[in-house]
Structure formats: C-alpha cells, structure tokens
Amino acid sequence: MSSVGSHERPVRVAIVGAGPAGFFAADALLRKEAPVFKVDLLERLPTPFGLVRSGVAPDHQKIKGVTRTFEKTASHGRFRFLGNVNVGKDLTADELAAHYDMVVYAVGSSTDRRLGIPGEHLAGSHAATAFVGWYNAHPDFNDFKFDLSVERAVVVGVGNVALDVARVLLRDRDELAKTDIAAPALEALRASAIREVVLVARRGAAQAAFTPAELEDLIELPSLSVRVDPAQLELDDAQLRLLDTAGRRNLELMRKVAAHPREAPRTLRLEFLASPVELLDDGIGRVCGLRLERNELASADGSRARGTGQFFELSAGLVFRSIGYFGSPLPGVAFDSKVGIIPNVEGRVTKTPGGEVVPHTYAVGWIRRSPTGVIGTNKADAQGVVGLMVEDVAKLPGRELVEIDTLLAGRGLAVTSFSEWAKLDALELAAGQEKGKVREKFVSVEEMMNELLRNKPSDEP
C-alpha cells in the first residue's frame, strides 16, 4: 500500500461547511506539494460560499467578489463540492471519521446572541441574523415575516451587521432593486413605512465596532440623514490616546455629521452609552418600545460599561438584536456552549474545553475562534490549522478508506456538485439580468433542486 500523503494515496480530508473558512482551508491544503491532500467540501445547502452569499449585504457586491477565488479552488482536480448534505442529520460525525483521514469543521456561527431581558419574546423582536438571512434569500429564513409598517426600528448593537440592517431598512428602494436582494424582501421594503432607525450601543462612540468604510457608506447616501448627539462624541485626552486608526476615523466622521446635520427623507440615529433593560409590550403581545438605562464607562480603556440608574424609554415597533453571532452544536461533535465554539487547541478539536485532543479532527474559522474579524481573517486562520494538519499526517494510520459516495447514494441523498451550482448560478444571473439587477436568487432548496432536475440532460442517470 502506498504511503498516506503520496500522489497514489492522498490524505483524504472532509471539510464541513462551504463558507470562506472552508474554502480557505481547502485552498491551503491543495497548495501543498507534499503531503498530497484530496478534499471533499460538504455543505448542507445546495449552494456554496456561506455568509459571502447569505450574510454580506446585497449592496456590497465588491465584497462578494471573493467568490472568484473560491471558484479557482473548486476547479482543482483533487477538490469536490458535495452540496445538500447535512452533517449531523444525513451523516454522523463518526461516519465522516470512518470515511476520511481527517475531518475539518468550518460551520461558522449561524445563530445570534440574546439580550436576556424581559419582552425579548414579543412579536416585532428579532435577531439581526434572521433579517440578514431573509433579505439575502437564505432558505432557512424564506418564510420569516417582518412588520415594516412601523415608523421607527431599533437595532441593538453597533457592529457592521447592525449598520447593514440599518442601511437596508433605509436605503433607496430603486437602488436596492439593482442588487441581488431577495425578491420578497424588496417587495416588503418598497411598502415599508420605516423612516428612522436608531442604533443603540452600551458603550461609547470610541468603542463602536463598525468600520469607517461602513459608516462612510451610510453617511454618503443622499436619501439618509445620520444624527448623533455631539455631547456623546466628547472624549478626554486619555481616551483619545487609546483610539486606534479606525476609532479615530469613526470619531472624525461622526463629529462631521453631528456638526453639519442635513435633512433627508430617512434618518439613522446613533445612541451611545445605553443598554436596553426591557422590551415594552403594547398590550397585545407586540413590542412598542424599549426601556433603557444610561451607562458610563467603567474602565479607562472603555472595555466595560456600567449602569447609572437613570432610565429612559424609546418608542419602536421593530427591534433587532445585533450583539454577535453564536455557534450551534453539531450532533456527535464536542461543543463549548459558554462561548459557542467547538473546543480546540489552536485548531485541533478537543473532547472538552481544555481536554483530550480528538485524533485527526480540526476546526477553522468562527467555530474555532468565535465570530471575530472579517472574511479575510479566515485565510490566515485556515493556513495556521492546515500547518497543524501537515504535522499530523505522520500520525495517520495506514488504512484503506471507502469513498463516501456509496453511503450517500444508499440514503437517497440528492448531492449537488460544483458544476450543478454553476448551473444554478447561471440561472440566477440570467433571471437577474432580465430584471435589471445583479441576480435573482432562488429562495428555497426545493426551488433549487427542481430547477436542477428540470435542466438535467436526458442522458444523465
């Protein structure tokens, strides 16, 4: 038998999750000349690209251009995309370990952190992740409904996702119509009555997590007025010295709009040093506002805030929590429920946090380190973990492996290939071109699979 890692017997790797982390890990593995790796990338949806497809805002098409890099990876002779395969449901973790030399989990962080306050259950209270999935045509959120008949929405959080939510709610609808926004979302936004969005942050302006580029995008929209209380932008010398380049630029931009407010049809208001303590009930089970507590910074570096005992109320018919993504457990895979990640040591999965390493099992991306950084951050992350995998090849047992295909076929799974994704991609682009937009996305798995069946050549089995 040829040695594991040779051209005759490549190291066979299953990567679970076809988002940026999964593709970057695949690329790093396939670039290795020795040992030689062969990669199957498994994804529960028929489509690849994860949050690049379903998380990046529709009016940020340049960011989505990273998929061209992923397409190059997918063209490699030792790469396969196995879409529409739900690991944990269609396949167990033990079955993956039996069919592959190494398994890499790159499943990201698909749920949200909760506020943990009274009234969070009310109608009109939503996770920002659900809204983002809905306007991006993610099949999991196809049936969600958002009441946009209200005049004011509140987003709790001041990261880039919070700004995305605000921008989509407030941006000119004709401009959104040119993007790849989901058709049902565009229709609902055209009828929206929302005129103001308030972003609420528990800490100060200096600690805002959004990037200057995202803030600048908002400020430059002619149909939008950005408002912030100048008093909330006053920092002492010690605070100013602690600002990094991004923080200084954010502060500069906010001071500019505070000093020169403009009139516009819609308004974004930034409210710093405030924490919601309760969502208010209108008496029939719907949110009608928030009760908030004024905060003060409790540390010199601004990392902690504490309540002052002063409260105020803010009316709103729609509230989104955008205080961070959170991982979800996979059946049969260790999970740290406190931080929402697969427990690991620098990428090697452990049975418990700080516990024994699970042989030849790895985690990359958000599910390894928690949801931090931008898309490109996952590249260095994946390369580091792949370095560990290369080290561990020498420890692999020299066993014969059976291809996973027979098992998948025996369970009647309609597995999609990358070439089938290319067909769906072409159909979406063509449908979008007819409507004068970037693409018209399929909004359900059933719709995608029916289209593939309809477009299947008659000579294919």
Image: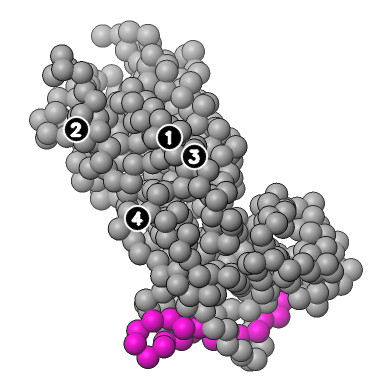
| Alpha-carbon span between mark 1 and mark 2 | 29 Å
Q: What residue type is labelled 3?
A: Lys
Q: Earlier in the sequence, mark 4 or mark 3?
A: 4
Stretch of the chain drawn in magenta? 278-305
Residue under label 1, please give it: 434
Q: Are marks 2 and 3 in contact (CB under 8 Å)?
A: no
Q: What residue type is labelled 1?
A: Glu
* Residue 425 image position (x, y, % from top left): 39, 30
Q: Residue 437 carries which label?
A: 3
Q: Which mark is residue 414?
A: 2
Relative placement, left or right, of 263 versus 451 is: right
- Which quadrant of the figure has residue 410? top left
Residue under label 4, please give it: 141
* 296 in magenta: yes
| Alpha-carbon span between mark 4 and mark 1 | 25 Å
Q: Judge the density around disc 1: few (<14), some (14-19), many (≥20) Cα neighbours within 10 Å.
A: few
Q: Which of marks 1 and 2 is nearer the N terminus?
A: 2
